[in-house]
Amino acid sequence: MNTIRKTIGLALIGALAIAAAQAQTISLPKRPILLSLNENAYGPAPAVRQAITAQFENLSRYTRNEGDVLIADIAKKEGVSADQVITGEILELLGVYLGIEAGPGSEFIYSVPGYPALVNAAARVGGKIVEIPLDAQLENDLPALEAAITPKTKAVYLVNPHNPSGTVSDKEGFKAFLHRISSKALVIVDEAYLEFTDDFEGRSAINNTRAGDNVIVFRTFAKAYGLAGLSIGYAIAPTPVAKLLKKQGLGSPHDLNRLAVVAADAALKDTVYLKNTAEQIILERKKWDQVLDGLGLKHTTSQSNFIYFDAKIPSEEVISKLKEQGIVVGKVFEPYHTWVRITVGLPTENERVQKALRDLNDHKFFSRP
């Protein structure tokens, strides 16, 4: 028996040695560069990681006063009452509620191409989607959006900065536009990317909400704060609207993941990390602008954490070529079938993608007949 065990042991050691030698000769593929979903490659602040770790011993407990603390901190940051804060990634739930509340055939206006979660949710319960194309600068077409409002309009949903173009609407013009149309319909402004603009406070629709306009502002911790994996955000609504939504079960902080709540609160408080990370992404975005200009590729004036450019050939071909090199970028957004969206990543990631585009350009990829 001992001889058999010894023989097996030696065979096992030999097999492991061979496997180790083979592993040294096999070059493992590089990790893909993920620049498709506008995530923050820098990740969350160290304080967020610490807050999550500190909660490990409480994972058997439901979220309690942590949720109330988060709401209070959000209210303080936004300069509103805690009653106006609705926590959670609520866009789809909000769309379902508004669609049911307004009834079949109620209209939901939004810009296309765009982020359709809310309007699609409303459509599933009988709402009618009204699509308004972007203007020539790939911005929200404010006059066309306003002209589309009818007595059947339940809500107008806007993303500013817009996705996928990264463009922002004129600051004062947007504020006046929101004031006008909010007297005709509820307005929901998704500001997922606002931290990457030149004027967070001045461009935010929260100014309209504070002034009493019928405007809901949505924010997320998924982008600038680096918490995409925890799926948490919040909305600020006029007090009557917020109370009604909470009465319907939206936004209870005690329904949220405990780790997401403490992580969001820690992220919210670390304003220095947020500022530094946003500034670094903006710096890298400006480098991207220079690269695209050098390649002769038209692009939007993005104020987000991604760039959007016209490759002059079908987007799918560019997406496929980059994927062959381990680079994953955004999908095609019709009708802009020659435009490509790329998230601004880490400097080394950006340089690798930029080199890939230069190589394609050197081979006349973007100027084929």
Image: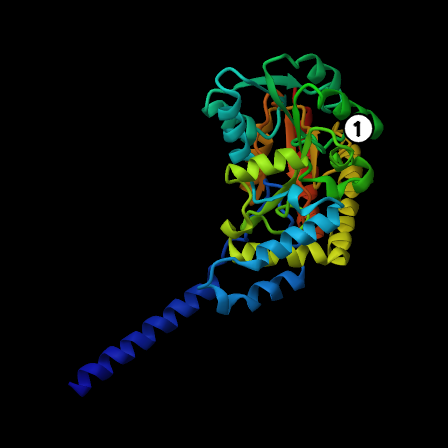
Left or right, residue 313 beside residue 1: right
Please identify the quarter of the rendering in which residue 209 is found.
Answer: top right
On the question of residue 219 being in view, the answer is no
Q: Look at the picture and state if 197 lies above or below 28.
A: above
> Which amino acid type is marked by label 1?
Lys
Left or right, residue 296 beside residue 10: right
Please identify the quarter of the rendering in which residue 200 is found.
Answer: top right
- Pick the residue in front: 42 or 312: 42
**Within 10 angstroms of label 1, few (less than 14), some, or many (20 or more) residues?**
some
Q: Secondary structure at mark 1?
A: helix
- Pick the residue in front: 31 or 68: 68
Q: Residue furthest bottom?
A: 2
Quarter of the figure that contains the N terminus: bottom left
Label 1: which residue? 175
Q: Position of residue 49 (x, y in %)?
A: 61, 63
Q: Position of residue 368 (x, y in %)?
A: 65, 23
Q: Residue furthest left?
A: 1
Q: Look at the picture and state if 104 lies above or below 117.
A: above
Residue occupying image coordinates x 63% and y 54%: 70
Residue occupying image coordinates x 28% and y 80%: 10
